[in-house]
Image: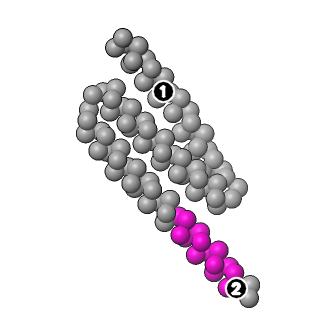
Amino acid sequence: MEQAFSWLLTGALLLLGVGLLLALIRAIRGPRTADHVLGINVVGTLSTACIAILAVLLRQSWLLDVALIYCMMSFLTVVILARAKIAAHREGEDRDE
């Protein structure tokens, strides 16, 4: 049973890794700013999930603290990028008037 659980977690890590790669590609190549921000958000979320699964797989509880801190940093990054995008959009509206 222990080995089946280990294989399940390893498979989940592989799938998350593929998703992480695809999200990173979207974040880099996204034609719009919203695609960039969304890609960065997904990369942060999937990275947090990978760290949490590694914590369970390696039986290292301190990795859960790292995952929590990384999640908070990712959230703040997305908030800051969204605020910058809104500010740039409002500045463009002010020029049009």
The boundaries of the magenta stretch are: 81-95
Q: Position of residue 77 (x, y in %)?
A: 46, 59
Q: Main secondary structure of the magenta part?
A: helix
Q: In which quadrant is the C terminus drawn? A: bottom right
Please say which color scheme the image uses: one colour
The residue positioned 42% from the left and 42% from the top of the image is 48
Q: Please name which of the two marks, 1 or 2, marks the residue nearer to the observer.
A: 1
Q: Which residue is mark 1?
A: 12
Establish if 73 lies above or below 51. Answer: below
At 34% across and 26% down in the image, what residue appears? 57
x then y, percent, for residue 13: 46, 29
The residue under label 1 is which amino acid type?
Ala
Image mark for residue 41 = none
The 10 Å Cα crowd at callout 1, few under 14, some 14 to 19, many 20 or more, is some
- Residue wearing tag 2: 95
Label 2 is placed on what type of residue? Arg
Looking at the rendering, in which quadrant would you find the N terminus? top left
